[in-house]
Amino acid sequence: MSLTIREFGVEDIELVLPLFLEMERHYEGDKAVDEETARARVAKALARKGENLFFGAFMPEMVGFAIVCEIFPGPDLRSQWHLKDLFVSDRSRGGKVGERLIRAAAKSIVARGGTRLAFTTGQDNLGAQRFYDRLGASRIPKVIVYGFDNEALVALANG
């Protein structure tokens, strides 16, 4: 069966929701949100399409997705992009789905004048690290990633 890479949006919610739920279970296990909550959150994100680009791999069910977000400013006061998520279904890993998705995202970013695609991966996600290394991504060792999660974000906002 052939693989099709295309952008997707809120009109595709029923087609894409199962893979978002699979990703949620993959990373969160028993703490994963329920289907109703996931549907509302995914639909809300997809409705803000102007802020993000959503690429899906379909055969015809969705087997992978890449989500990229534009960030300004980047180098030379041009846009740079952040790869928020690249997820491929367990059953489709190893079949170049991820590579085709990230290449589609890169093509779209370059066409929009983007100069950089940046992302993070877990220190223990060695498979992802090998994947990005194989594609020629550069590691940025001088960067330390910070974040405010949940209660810390609320405390900062109220502080």
Image (cartoon, rainbow, N blue to C red):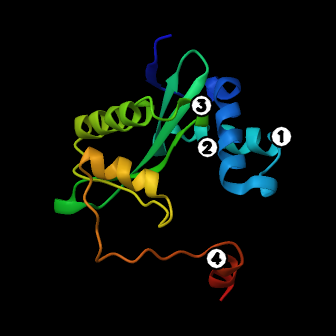
Q: Secondary structure at mark 2?
A: helix
Q: Which label was assigned to residue 36? A: 1
Q: Nearer the viewer, mark 1 or mark 4?
A: 1
Q: Amino acid at mark 4?
A: Leu
Q: Nearer the viewer, mark 2 or mark 3?
A: 3
Which callout, 2 or 3, points at the residue further toward the start of the chain? 2
In front of the other: 65 or 38: 65
The residue indicated by pointer 3 is: 91
Residue 99 in percent (x, y) is at 37, 35
Q: Amino acid at mark 1?
A: Glu
Placement of 116 over or under 53, stated as above or below: below
Q: Amino acid at mark 3?
A: Arg
Which callout, 1 or 3, points at the residue further toward the start of the chain? 1
The residue indicated by pointer 4 is: 153
In front of the other: 140 or 14: 140
Residue 153 in percent (x, y) is at 64, 76
Which callout, 1 or 2, points at the residue further toward the start of the chain? 1
Q: Nearer the viewer, mark 1 or mark 3?
A: 3
Q: Report the residue at 80% width, 45% height from top.
A: 37
How far is the residue under mark 1 from the one under mark 2?
14 Å
Residue 95 in percent (x, y) is at 44, 29
Q: Which image quarter holds the C terminus?
A: bottom right
How far is the residue under mark 1 from the one under mark 3?
24 Å
Q: Secondary structure at mark 3?
A: helix
The residue indicated by pointer 2 is: 45
Q: Secondary structure at mark 1?
A: helix
Q: Which label was assigned to residue 24? A: none
Placement of 29 over or under 34, stated as above or below: below
Q: Secondary structure at mark 4?
A: helix
Which callout, 2 or 4, points at the residue further toward the start of the chain? 2
Placement of 119 over or under 109, stated as above or below: below
Q: Report the residue at 62% width, 83% height from top.
A: 156
